[in-house]
Amino acid sequence: MKKILGAMVATLIISNSAAAMQFSQSVQIGQIGFPVQSPYNGFIITGANENSGVAQIEEGQFLNDGTPLKTYAKGVARWDKLFCDYDFNDDDYLHSIRLGGRGNYVLASDMSFKDIFKIDSDENLTLYVFYHNYCTTHLNIIGVKNGAWQNYIDSKKISEIYFGGNDGYKMDGSIFYDKPICDGEKIIIPYRRWHWEGTSDIEGEIILKWNDAAQWFSVEQIKY
């Protein structure tokens, strides 16, 4: 009987372990946006598999490899499964970049320059991370699971819940998020504080885990 119970417990442990969704390390797949105070006539877009926008050569501006810098004013770009409808001249600049599935955009974003990362899982969930960093940070995570797109994480909402909304541009002592890293079933977002003299050491981390019952992410704060 003890052997049978032991085998049942071992099976349960293995089953529970296998049930936790596992995440691969994030990989940068592109960029989009308008760098602060830049003189450009459109958005910088890099890494896209497709882009319907018309390229403009920015006179006297070059990439690190010496090639002329190109920008794009209006179009649709695609990275992997991710589509982006952008309009540099949209009167509503806070929503000039829209992201999600083809014609199914779940995130409207401002013009600010963003790095784009992809996170794969061992189940049918693919995540895309948008990370802005210039005297403040803003991080969004959207994803597609079984064909359905969702806007899962907005760092500004996390700041409201855990840090009293202390999160703003050039705000001394405000929360400053690092790029997310993955460790098995966890997506980890370390956080610091922004100060005029420089950012602090890491003070803690936000832990995201997939909750299969809720079909959403749980959020936990760890303070160092």
Image (spheres, grey):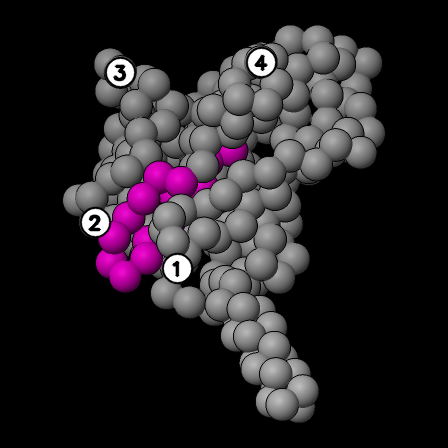
Relative image position of residue 52 (x, y in whole percent): 24, 46
Stretch in magenta: 139-152
Residue bearing the label numbered 4: 164
Label drawn at residue 92:
3
- In this rendering, the answer to whether 215 lies above or below 21 is above
> Are the residues tagged 1 and 3 within 8 Å (C-beta)?
no
Whichever of labels 2 and 4 marks the residue nearer the N terminus, that label is 2
**At 55% across and 14% down in the image, what residue appears?**
165
Whichever of labels 1 and 4 marks the residue nearer the N terminus, that label is 1
Q: Nearer the viewer, mark 2 or mark 4?
A: 4
- In this rendering, the answer to whether 17 lies above or below 79 is below
Mark 3 Cα-neighbour bin, 10 Å: few <14, some 14–19, many ≥20: few
**SS majority, magenta:** strand
Label drawn at residue 125:
1
Label drawn at residue 102:
2
Whichever of labels 1 and 3 marks the residue nearer the N terminus, that label is 3
* Quadrant location of the C terminus in the rendered image: top right
Q: Nearer the viewer, mark 1 or mark 3?
A: 1
Whichever of labels 3 and 4 marks the residue nearer the N terminus, that label is 3
Whichever of labels 3 and 2 marks the residue nearer the N terminus, that label is 3
Q: In the figure, residue 99 lies in which quadrant?
A: top left
Give how far apart the Cα atoms at labels 2 and 4 are.
36 Å
